[in-house]
Each structure stands twice: as structure tokens, then as C-alpha cells.
Image: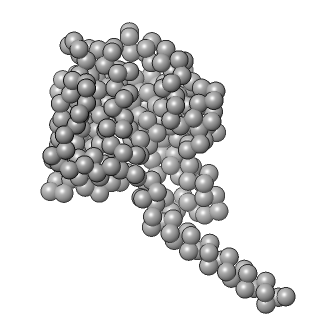
């Protein structure tokens, strides 16, 4: 009996260690799900748009698309998308902003779409900063809205903590990527394992601009309980808007969110 127990425990330990090693070395593949596009790929957007890129180094290019409103832009939304696909996947949200007279600059992270290089936390921050600097050539901070969705909320918050803007808007944010990993892999020392930490909780208190957060109670990717911890870090006047029944992908279908966005962007 003792021998059988030892064999079982040894087997469980081997499985635990093997799974932990796999999680560590495969975490980038778990976290990033890019759609890679060739440099000569032709976007077929119906919106008025123009492609742009920034050559960072010999292996890295930041590619983004500028979507334009019908009339002269009153401001710009710098949009940081989620962890899947490319700009094509998120283009459907552009009208939320262009209908209010905003340009939308939507970037693909390194390794996504036409952007080249190796994805990672610091490179996402650097790309965000380069896009912001380019936007500042044309727009004052009071005409710049920083918007983050899912993975992009940590990048957006980090940028807003370092540079002024009119408002920071976060859709389905996380407290930190470490805390999300702890939810799924609670049996591992994930704080030591996670490479892309994206600590929204550390950056949010440094944001001086007004903040609006949207999160659904039925989010099956970033739990509502994880995001709601950000409430304690908000300033007076900031907003955390709960969408009962909302999940990770359908918040834009809620009239409450659309009405709030209209209110924020129409003034």
C-alpha cells in the first residue's frame, strides 16, 4: 500500500512539474494569438483609412491604421486591441468613435498583422509611446482619448500613467496579468513564472485623466471579480460601469455602454 501511494505521489509530482514547465515555456502562445499578415496585404475596410508604420529597428516595425471621420477630426482615439487576430478583427468598433468626429489610430502589436518583431510587454509599451508621440504632432493632450480593450487595457493604462490625455477608457480590464494567471493556475507560483505582467493596478493610480471602465458580470476570460478590484484605485469622478450579464465579447451590444460612450465622446 505504501509503495502504491509513493508511486501515485511521484506520478502526480511529475505531472505537476511537467505542466508547470509547459505553462512557463508556452505562455506567450497562450497569451498572444496573432493573425500575421504579409506586408503587401490589402485591407478592404469600408471606412476612410490610411496605413502607417514606424520602423523601430532592423527587425521591428510598428504598423497601424488611421481611420478618419467624415469631417475634420475634433480629436483622436488611440485604440489598443485584444490578444487575438489583427486590426481587421477590431475594425468593427471604429464607428463608435468616428461618428463623434474622432480619428481612430489602431495599432497591431509586434507580431500581429503587419507589425514585425517579437511580442512582449516592454515592446508593447514602447510601441504605444511611439504612436502617442506621433499623435501629439497633430493633437493636444485634451484632444487625445486612450482606449484599451482586454489585453490592451494594461498597455493603455501604462501609457495614460505616463502621458496626459482627455480620458482613459477601459473595456474588460484586468487587475494585473499575474492576478489573472493566479485565477487559472492557482496551484503554481505564477508571480515568479509570468513574464508579461501588465500590472494595471500599479499604473492606474498614476493616471490623472478621468477614467471610465466597462466590465460584464459574466466575463469568462477576465473574471468580473478580478476587474472589480480596480474600483479601489479610482479617483473621485472616475467610473466603473458594471454590465449585468455582459461577457468578454459582447459589451458593445449593450445600450448602456453605447449610451455612455456617446455621452463621453459627444461633449
Check the image and tell me how it is coloured.
Answer: one colour
Q: Quadrant of the C terminus?
A: top left
Q: Is residue 200 left or right of residue 216?
A: left
Residue drawn 46% across and 60% down? 27
Q: Is residue 240 left or right of residue 115?
A: right
User: Is residue 147 placed above or below 3 in the rendered structure?
Assistant: above
The extreme right residue here reads 1
| Labels in figure, total | 0
In this orientation, which residue lies closer to the viewer: 139 or 255?
A: 255
Q: Is residue 110 left or right of residue 72?
A: right
Residue drawn 57% across and 24% down? 241
Residue drawn 34% across and 26% down? 94
Q: Quadrant of residue 165?
A: top left
In this orientation, which residue lies closer to the viewer: 4 or 208?
A: 4
Q: Could you tell me residue 42's position as x and y percent?
A: 19, 40
In this orientation, which residue lies closer to the viewer: 56 or 208?
A: 56
Q: Is residue 200 among the parts visible in the rendering?
A: yes
Q: Is residue 205 among the parts visible in the rendering?
A: no
The extreme top residue here reads 267
Q: Could you tell me residue 17's position as x and y percent?
A: 58, 74
User: Is residue 128 placed above or below 250 in the rendered structure?
Assistant: below
Q: Quadrant of the N terminus?
A: bottom right
Q: Could you tell me residue 218's position as x and y percent?
A: 63, 36
In this orientation, which residue lies closer to the viewer: 45 or 49?
A: 45
Q: Quadrant of residue 236?
A: top right
Q: Could you tell me residue 164's position as x and y percent?
A: 33, 27
Residue drawn 22% across and 37% down? 43
Amino acid at each position: 500500500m505504501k509503495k502504491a501511494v509513493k508511486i501515485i505521489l511521484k506520478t502526480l509530482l511529475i505531472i505537476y512539474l511537467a505542466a508547470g514547465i509547459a505553462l512557463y515555456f508556452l505562455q506567450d502562445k497562450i497569451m498572444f494569438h496573432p493573425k500575421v499578415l504579409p506586408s503587401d496585404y490589402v485591407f478592404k475596410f469600408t471606412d476612410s483609412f490610411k496605413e502607417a508604420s514606424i520602423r523601430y529597428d532592423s527587425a521591428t516595425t510598428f504598423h497601424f491604421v488611421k481611420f478618419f471621420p467624415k469631417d475634420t477630426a475634433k480629436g483622436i482615439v488611440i485604440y489598443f486591441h485584444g490578444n487575438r487576430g489583427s486590426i481587421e478583427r477590431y475594425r468593427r468598433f471604429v464607428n463608435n468613435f468616428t461618428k463623434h468626429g474622432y480619428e481612430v489610430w489602431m495599432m497591431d502589436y509586434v507580431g500581429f498583422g503587419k507589425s514585425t518583431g517579437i511580442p512582449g510587454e516592454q515592446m508593447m509599451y514602447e510601441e504605444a509611446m511611439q504612436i502617442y508621440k506621433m499623435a501629439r504632432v497633430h493633437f493636444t493632450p485634451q484632444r487625445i482619448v486612450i482606449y484599451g480593450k482586454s489585453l490592451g487595457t494594461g498597455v493603455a493604462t501604462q501609457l495614460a500613467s505616463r502621458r496626459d490625455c482627455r480620458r482613459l477608457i477601459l473595456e474588460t480590464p484586468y487587475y494585473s496579468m499575474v492576478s489573472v494567471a493566479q485565477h487559472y493556475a492557482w496551484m503554481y507560483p505564477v508571480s515568479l513564472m509570468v513574464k508579461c505582467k501588465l500590472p494595471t493596478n500599479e499604473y492606474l493610480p498614476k493616471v490623472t485623466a478621468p477614467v471610465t471602465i466597462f466590465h460584464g458580470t459574466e466575463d469568462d476570460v477576465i473574471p468580473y471579480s478580478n476587474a472589480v478590484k480596480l474600483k479601489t484605485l479610482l479617483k473621485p469622478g472616475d467610473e466603473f460601469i458594471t454590465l449585468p450579464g455582459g461577457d468578454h465579447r459582447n459589451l458593445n451590444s449593450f445600450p448602456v455602454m453605447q449610451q455612455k460612450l456617446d455621452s463621453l465622446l459627444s461633449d
